[in-house]
Amino acid sequence: QVQLVESGGGLVQAGGSLRLSCAASGSIFSINAWGWYRQAPGKKRELVALITSGGTTTHADSVKGRFTISRDNVKNTMYLQMNSLKPEDTAVYYCNVRDIFNEYWGQGTQVTVSS
C-alpha cells in the first residue's frame, strides 16, 4: 500500500505561480511511475505530467514550458512547479503513483486561477 498526501493548491491570479507537493509513504520502493493529473468541472481527468522511476519526464502539450514535474527521492516527494498560470489551468489536481499491480491516488488539491 502507498499513501499520498498532497499540498500546495490555492487561489492565484493569472500569470502567477504555485508549487504542488505530493508526499508518499508506505511501499514506495515498488513505484515505477509518478504523475500529476487534473480534472476541471465537467471534464475528464487528464494527465498533466509524469516522471518515471528513472527520472524521465513527460508533460502535456498544454503545460509544456510552464509546468515542471520533479521528484525528491530522499523526501519521497513529488512536485509540480506551475508558472504562468492561466484561468484554464483551474482544476482539482491529483497525484498518482503506480507499481506493477496497482495505482494510488491522492485526495486532490484545488487550484483556481483568476483572470
Image: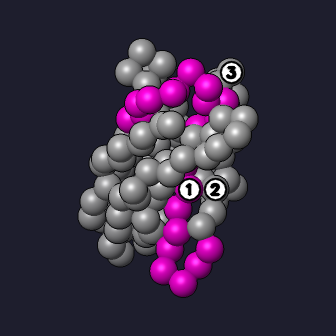
Three-letter amino acid code at the position of disc 1: Tyr
Three-letter amino acid code at the position of disc 2: Leu
Q: Which mark is residue 37?
A: 1
Within 10 Å of disc 3 (Cα), the crowding (few <14, some 14-19, many 20+) is few
Within 10 Å of disc 1 (Cα), the crowding (few <14, some 14-19, many 20+) is some
| Residue 77 shows in this picture | no
1 and 2 marks in contact (CB < 8 Å): yes
Asked which secondary structure carries label 3, the reply is loop
| Residue 42 shows in this picture | yes
Q: Disc 3 designates what residue?
A: 54
The residue under the point 48% across, 37% down is: 2
Magenta stretch encompasses residue 27: yes
**Earlier-in-chain disc, 3 versus 1:** 1
Magenta residues (range): 23-44
Query: Which residue is more in the foreground, 9 or 107?
Result: 107
Q: Residue furthest top?
A: 74
Asked which secondary structure carries label 1, the reply is strand
**Earlier-in-chain disc, 2 versus 3:** 2
